[in-house]
Image: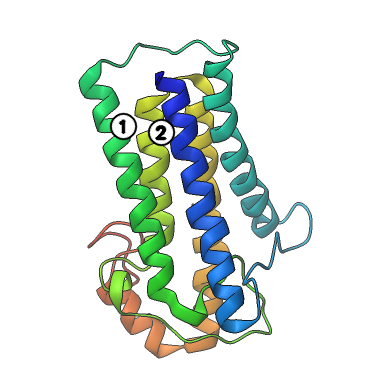
Amino acid sequence: MSRPLLALSLLVLFYVVVFGLRTWQHLRTTGSTGFHGISGRPGSAEWIGGVLFVIGIVLGFFAALGELLGWLVPLWQPGPWGVAAGVTITLAGILSTYASQISMGSAWRIGVREDERTQLIVGGAFKVVRNPIFSCMLLTATGMLLLLPNAMSIAALASLLTAVELQVRVVEEPYLLRTHGRRYRDYARRVGRFIPGFGRLD
């Protein structure tokens, strides 16, 4: 199997597990898909974050398809160890993203609705970092960049990183502080934002 085809296969696995399987499981359990879509008024930081998230996902797909079809040229040719590292990191990212989603149970959502109150999850993967789903998605994108070292993969990772920063800092953290108050603040003082020990609230 060629490197771009391998990368494309891993991306399809990511979409199926993280979006398809998890949404189907949530729908069966709760009667809701948990998907709230892109929120916020157009042009707001919240809306920009949602749009950049979608762009990052789409760019990741075309980074693989583009190399497979010869539209994109890699910036360097990964050797066997680079490919192995990319596959390992990508698989670890996919599995850990799914495990983090499962940690949320019925509180799992894609997006935030101001009028909705969900349980504050602090166990499982959330003992390690406050946003393990996003951390693991970024890990997946990093693995894909090792597999597909082209300009579109770099743009995909940059878009995803910017989207996650906006979503967490501008949308989710203020929402959780308003909704859960001191309990969330105490949790955020102990647990890092994306990396253990880093990004704790004062």
Residue 56 pos. (x, y %) = 57, 40
Q: Residue at x 50, y 10 (%)?
A: 73
Quarter of the image for residue 175 reads bottom right
Q: Is residue 168 left or right of residue 125?
A: right
Nearer to me, 112 or 104: 104
| Mark linked to residue 144 | 2
Q: Is residue 112 left or right of residue 169?
A: right
Nearer to me, 63 or 45: 63
Residue 46's place in the image compared with 145, above or below, is below
Q: For residue 56, say whether it is visible.
A: yes
Labelled pair 2, 1 in contact (Cβ < 8 Å)? yes
Query: Mark 1 sits on what residue?
Result: 86
Residue 162's place in the image compared with 76, above or below, is below
Kind of residue at badge 1: Gly
Neighbour class for label 2 at 10 Å: few (<14), some, many (≥20)?
many
- The mark nearer the N terminus, 2 or 1, is 1
